[in-house]
Amino acid sequence: MKKLPRAGRAAARLRLECEGYERERAALALLDQTLSDAEKTQTERYLAPLVRTMQPAFSAVFPGASLEMDTGFALSGLTRRTAEEFGRLSDGTREQIAVLVRLGFAELLHARQSPAILVLDDALSFSDSQRLESMFDVLADAATRFQILVLTCHAEAFARLGGRALALRPIPQITERR
C-alpha cells in the first residue's frame, strides 16, 4: 500500500517535469522562429538595395526578367517566362549574371562615394554576339562612373568597348633564365 502513494507522487513529479520541458520546448521554438524572422528581415534589408541597383543593367541584358538572390549574395534563380534554377542556366548566361552581380556591388560602392573598380578577368567568353553587345552597352555606361579593368586573351572581341588597351611585355631581367 505504501507503494501506491509513492508512485502517485512520482507520477505527479514526472508530469510537472514534462510540463516544464514542454514550456522550454515552446520557448525554444518561439526563439527559433523569432530569430528566423529577424534574419529574413535583415537579409531582405541588405539584399534589396543590391537587387534594386542591379535591376537596370540586368533588364538591359535580360529584358523582362527578374532575379532572385539568396542570403549568401548568390543568385538562386532567374525568372523569364518561368522560374529557372541558376545551375540549369547556360554557361554564357551564368557568366553574364556573375558580371552583373559584380557590377551591382561596384555600383553600390560608387553610390556611397566609396572607391569602386570592376576587374573582369576573361569574363564573357561564353557569350553569344547579341548578348555580348548588350553587356558592352551596360559596361560602357558603368565606365562613365567608375573604372573597369578588362583582362582578356581575346582583345579583338573587346575592341568595341574602347578604353585604353594595355599590353604586357616581358622584362628581360625578370624573364631571363639565370
Image: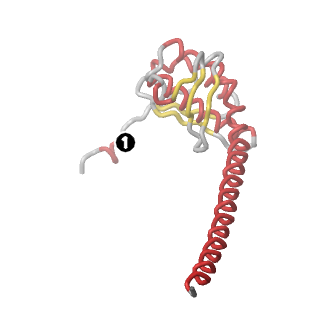
Badge 1: how crowded within 10 Å, few (<14), some, or many (20+)? few
Residue that carries the numbered disc 1 in the rendered image: 171
Extreme-left residue of the structure: 178
Extreme-top residue of the structure: 130
> For this view, does 32 lie left or right of residue 151?
right
- State the residue at coordinates (60%, 39%): 70
Question: Where is 41 relative to 160, above or below?
Answer: below
> For this view, does 98 lie left or right of residue 114?
left
Q: Position of residue 96 (x, y in %)?
A: 53, 26
- State the residue at coordinates (68%, 33%): 51
Quarter of the image with the N terminus is: bottom right
Q: Nearer the viewer, residue 131 or 65?
A: 65
Question: Where is 17 relative to 76, above or below?
Answer: below
Q: How is the image coloured?
A: secondary structure
Q: Nearer the viewer, residue 178 or 129?
A: 129
Q: Position of residue 144 (x, y in %)?
A: 69, 27
